[in-house]
Amino acid sequence: MCVYVFRHNHGGADVSELIIGVDLGGTNVKTALVSRDKKVLGKDSRPTRAEEGPEAVMTCMAESVEAVIAQTGARRDDVLAAGIGAPGPMNWQTGVVYSPPNLPGWKNVPLADEMTKRLGFPVYVDNDANVACYGEYWLGAGQGAENMCLLTLGTGVGGGIVVFGQLLRGIDGTAAEIGHLKVMRGGRACGCGATGCLEAYGSVTGMVRTAVEGIESGRKTILTDWCKGDLKAITGKMISDGIEQGDEFCRWVMNETGVWLGIGISSLINLLNPEKVILCGGMIAAGDVLFDPIRKTARELTFEVPANRAQILAAGLGADSGVIGSAGCALARFESGI
Ligand SMILES: [Zn+2]
């Protein structure tokens, strides 16, 4: 086993150099041990056991943290802090997680305090989309930019915004809900209770809805065979596969999804003048079929100066933006005392 030494001597005082990031998802807990100089030294992933409730989930996270420390041979004294990216709603300052839909039995869980007790070093809790954004800023495709936005394209559309190196949180910590930018008056109903949200068009779920509406209006596609006439069985994966098979309708659906995302992103670019807008999630594997309409639409609808500035890019950390961002965010909060 390779044993790392992470204590640097600064003016006679030992300074710890390691941070732990934890990505708490409904299905898996992912953990990474990262050095202050941004090297990922070890990783762990295990099932969340969400159905067993908060105690079991916290035990699972603590075990994952211990595993990643043991794996690298680091000393736990060398760990400065840990960050957890958790699903909201939550209070990021107190570290209390209210009642995330994908974590059954969670109600006002003081996650930061409980995990600090279990681990023995400071634990910071943040919204999962915000930490993913910070991960891309810190170590991913956002490196070198001080102003950037991230959109996570999954079942919903999550968002994070960094302005001059800091997450934009808003007074209650609820800022950067990019998925709920309105892109249409009286449009599709959204899970948030409003209508016309970007998420209802630009998420995987929104894309599937576009496909179903198209088929219902009489468009011909291989999807009808694949789902055996049951339109509820259509998935995002089927649409991607359809594009690979040369299905024109599937290509149109992905293009439409890109146009909707481009509309939302044009507002972000006009509003924030970011250097980079980064997209993550399984859908980005579609590549140019998705990115071309996003870039074209965003450019058409945006002022020239911010449009020239903003690069629209795929995430650089793949599925690890969250776990690495949790570590980066914890380091930033540890150092700034927030
Ligand atoms: Zn909404």
Image (tube, grey):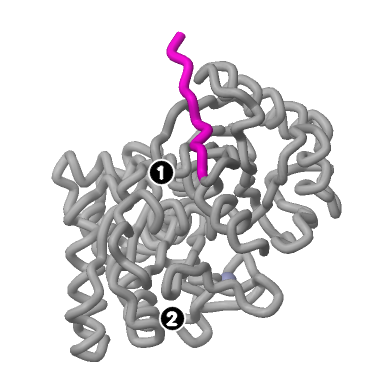
List the residue tagged with mark 2: 183
Tell me if 259 is positioned left or right of 233 in this view. Answer: left
Q: Which residues are magenta?
A: 1-10
**Sequence order check: which comes first, mark 2 or mark 1?**
1
Q: Which mark is residue 103?
A: none
List the residue tagged with mark 1: 37
Q: Secondary structure at mark 2?
A: loop
Residue placed most toward the observer, 25 or 273: 273
Residue placed most toward the observer, 75 or 71: 75
Name of the residue lying farthest toward the left: 246
Residue at 35 percent of width and 58 percent of height: 279
Name of the residue lying farthest toward the bottom: 303
Residue 25 seen in render:
no
Which amino acid, by three-letter code, is at mark 2?
A: Val
Name of the residue lying farthest toward the top: 1
260 vs 299: above or below: above
Picture coordinates of residue 15, whole percent (x, y):
57, 41
